[in-house]
Image (cartoon, rainbow, N blue to C red):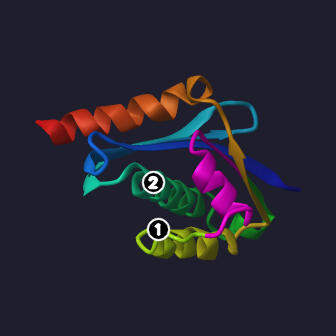
Amino acid sequence: MTNKLIINTDGGARGNPGPAGIGVVIKNEKGEVLAEISKYIGKTTNNQAEYQALVAGIEKCAKLVGEKAKETELDFLLDSELVVKQMRGEYKVRNVDLQPWFVKVYNQTLKFKKVKFGHVRREKNKEADALANQAMDKGDN
């Protein structure tokens, strides 16, 4: 039996680079929230924040499922078309600051049965966006 988790992630920076935060919402197939992450990550760019949100999300999924990772599918939904296309292999990761983040996410995906990355419009990513903004608000103070 395969388990599936749906993970909405968002990362943002005020200023680009500027004070940045990440937001992650992990749900099961029934839509029940299993975990949320809202974390201030310091000064960075929007794209780096998007990748850091992916890393936080995939690492949390690994902790949630433990030894069942090889039986688990992950569906990531994020509003960064660039990061989605890079993770799908449609775009090369040319930015040297993003390359280590890409590798970190890619290596984590190998633990799971299947990992998909999908692009959603910003209005379909409100929960993760709100968590990222909460984190940025904390960092601004």
Residue 124 place in picture, x, y as percent: 62, 26
Q: Amino acid type of disc 1?
A: Leu
Left or right of 37? Residue 109 is right
| Residue lying at 56% horizontally and 29% vertically, measured from the top left | 122
| Res 21 label | none
**In the picture shown, does residue 117 fall above or below 79?**
below
Residue 39 visible in the snapshot:
no
Residue in front for this viewpoint, 31 or 41: 41
**In the picture shown, does residue 12 fall above or below 56?**
above
Region in magenta: 75-92
| Res 47 label | 2
Asked whether the residues under the numbered discs 1 and 2 touch, taking CB atoms below 8 Å apart as contact, a structural biologist would say yes
Residue 90 place in picture, x, y as percent: 74, 62
Rate crowding at label 1 as few (under 14), some (14 to 19) or many (20 or more) other CA atoms within 10 Å: some
| Res 98 label | 1
Residue 79 place in picture, x, y as percent: 58, 39
Secondary element at image label 2:
helix
Q: How many labels, in total?
A: 2
User: Residue at the right extreme?
Assistant: 1
Residue 107 is covered by the magenta coloring: no
Secondary element at image label 1:
loop
Q: Quadrant of the N terminus?
A: bottom right
Residue 115 visible in the snapshot:
yes
Q: In which quarter of the image is the C terminus?
A: top left
* Quadrant housing residue 71: bottom right
Rate crowding at label 2 as few (under 14), some (14 to 19) or many (20 or more) other CA atoms within 10 Å: many
User: Residue at the front extreme?
Assistant: 94
* Quadrant housing residue 72: bottom right
